[in-house]
Amino acid sequence: MTIQLHNTLTRRKEVFSPIDPANVRMYVCGPTVYDRAHLGNARPAIVFDVLFRLLRLTYGEHNVTYVRNFTDVDDKINARAARDNKPISDITEETIAWYLDDMAAVGVGLPTYMPRATEYIAQMRDMIEDLIAKGHAYTAQGHALFAVDSYADYGGLSGRSVEDMIAGARVEVAPYKRNPMDFVLWKPAEDHEPGWDSPWGRGRPGWHIECSAMARDLLGDAFDIHGGGNDLMFPHHENEIAQSRCAHPECGFANIWMHNEMLQVEGKKMSKSLGNFFTVRDLLDKAVPGEVIRFVMLMTHYRKPMDWTASKASDAQSTLRKWHSLDRPDLPAGQPRADIVKALSNDLNTSLVLTLLTQWADTLRKRSHDSVQAQEVADFFASARLIGLLDDTTSMGAWVSAGAVTDHSYDTDLNTLGDRLRDLRIEAMQTKNFNAVDDLKAMLIAAGIEVRMSKAGVDLMPADGFDPVKLKGLM
């Protein structure tokens, strides 16, 4: 199956052609580890986890290398350590553990490598020395800085001129800079801050150099895909390209650049001032299942702004309950259906994948349990697992298992009662008397059935507290 991906650098969707199909390589910028991951942090983790799954399906599980880093040296980390009166290493270790736990809860698998910036200081120093030797960087007052003027294509990723970038960015104005846009590769460290020896004095690396050094060390001078959130396009990714291509002009660094759009909450930008800022853990602690969080994230194409709403979470939970109700013991091995793989291969069209899966599940549920072949269900589950849902290798589905019903003999009863409620509703629309509709709906709810009525029809499904005995009493 041909994969097409939108390349931010060329501003078009391209056929993905890896440098080496037996060694497909992807780098994604990970978190700065000073606090809990907020909901927006989960979006790139989920998006590129889906891409990792697709690449492994296409090229082979052992032929794809995925690197996602941890930034564990940063001013925010230092500030948190000072605030909490804890060693910096305690802050980073704790935060990394939080991040991995929270991402696992939303079905994000482990990348091939998860390097920490502090493990690659030597590689960063080597790269900085090389840039200085080639005339692309200079030293001043204990700093090493990249000379933006030395790279003619600066701004090519974001599509903005240097003048526009200066006007729209918070550029640190410093007397030791030759150009306001020159960015820090190395800076002095205070005595109480983490620091390492270098030819320019004791200090620590700038933010941008770490990803270039780690990507080169783990993936080589050139690799296939570089990803991250849209907020990283400038200056972080722009600076990565500049320093990496200047250090190794014979290589293009990353061939395809992918960026996911940002997240909103109930139509507004997530911010603490609006009171709509929350972490992944906040949702999990409020009994929003990780699988539901992932489903809502996948409802919107990754290149479009995503709006988290309570109603979306409720719809996702209802849909997932229906999907889980199809499960049965001893399913054979399944294969993702071709149209599902095709949709996902079209620039990760997860919204279409969810539509196809929902239609498929509805078709399976409308048939009697005995008439649905186990292979059909196995293929359905394999298709859902391709985007990280219904995944039996994680604990994501545990939220539904307590209320799950293994006896599927009620499926026919639900279909019959659904047809009856539909007919009563049609009659009530004509007579304007909805008493019979309301009575049956109330009895269904009392039996633990979720009742959904829309222009499309009536849909019934078991919910928490479902009682098959009460359901039989309505037949």
Image: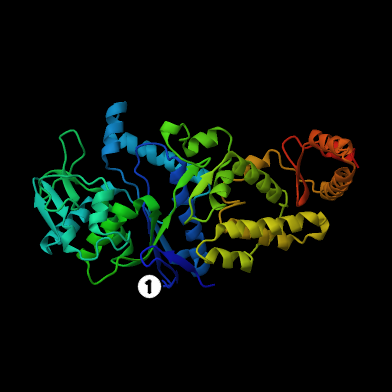
x, y percentage for residue 249? Answer: 22, 69
Residue 21 sits above or below residue 243 on the image: below
Residues 151 and 29: in front is 151
Q: Residue furthest left?
A: 141
x, y percentage for residue 162? Answer: 23, 57
Can residue 304 be spotted in the picture? yes
Does 50 sit left or right of 169 as displayed?
right
Does 411 sit left or right of 184 as displayed?
right
The residue shown at (50%, 49%) is: 306
x, y percentage for residue 333? Answer: 65, 62
The residue shown at (58%, 40%) is: 289
The residue shown at (46%, 65%) is: 62
Image quarter hosting the N terminus = bottom right
The residue shown at (56%, 43%) is: 290
- Count residues near mark 1 (Cα–Cα under 10 Å), then give few for <14, some for 14-19, many for 20+: few
Image quarter hosting the C terminus = top right
Can residue 87 be spotted in the picture? no
Does 123 sit left or right of 97 as displayed?
left
Q: Residue 350, located in which quarter of the rendered image?
A: bottom right
Residue 471 sits above or below residue 412 on the image: above
Query: How many numbered circles are shown?
Result: 1
Q: Residue 94, located in which quarter of the rendered image?
A: top left
Residue occupied by mark 1: 19
Q: In what element is the residue under mark 1?
A: loop
Q: Amino acid at mark 1?
A: Ile
Structure colour scheme:
rainbow
Residue 379 sits above or below residue 285 on the image: below
x, y percentage for residue 63? Answer: 44, 67
Does 367 sit left or right of 203 as displayed?
right
